[in-house]
Amino acid sequence: QVQFVESGGGLVQAGESLRLSCKISGMIPDYYAIAWFRQAPGKEREGVSCISSHDGSTYYSDSVKGRFTISRDHAKNTVYLQMNSLKPEDTAVYYCGGDINIPKMIGAVVRGTPLARGSWGQGTQVTVSA
């Protein structure tokens, strides 16, 4: 079973950057999507970004496109989320996870909606002050 451990969250000011890390253990299937979702207080969990394991294609929600970048280091079994130009509305718990249903994962990320499937880590808090 694939497991995910997030790190790198913290408190920053608006306009600053953070890089989240997601350490992955277990065997990742050849056809698999690894993603970052986030959940702000009082809101549903929403897709932020994902990367396909078979071809490395990346996807983003409109709210983070152009500011966030997802990447994967195969040697370290780690996926990163580089977050630049952070805004107070980016404040949330960020979760790393994955699923074999790539189209559903991509759909949730692009639409910024929840995904009621997949395996997920415990999350890391990101707080952006104005």
Image (cartoon, helix red, strand yellow):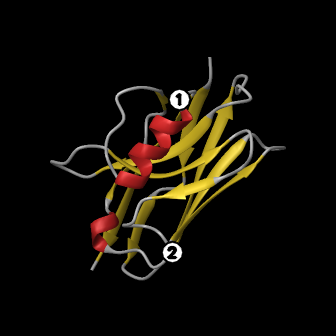
Foreground of the two, 91 or 110: 110
> Which residue, given by chain and number where applicable, does mark 1 sit on?
101
Cα distance between the residues tagged 2 and 1: 25 Å
Say what amino acid the circle numbered 1 marks: Asn
| Residue drawn at point x = 51 percent, y = 75 percent | 66
Q: Position of residue 27 (x, y in %)?
A: 73, 23
| Residue drawn at point x = 34 percent, y = 75 percent | 87
The N terminus: image quadrant: top right
Q: Position of residue 57 (x, y in %)?
A: 66, 52
For residue 14, which quarter of the picture?
A: bottom left
The C terminus: image quadrant: bottom left
Q: Is the residue 15 above or below the residue 45 in the image?
A: below
> Which residue, given by chain and number where applicable, does mark 2 sit on?
66
| Residue drawn at point x = 45 percent, y = 79 percent | 85
Say what amino acid the circle numbered 2 marks: Gly
Is residue 94 in view? no
Q: Is the residue 50 above or below the residue 130 in the image?
A: above
For label 2, the SS is loop
Crowd band around label 1 with a 10 angstrom C-alpha radius: few (<14), some (14–19), many (20+) = few
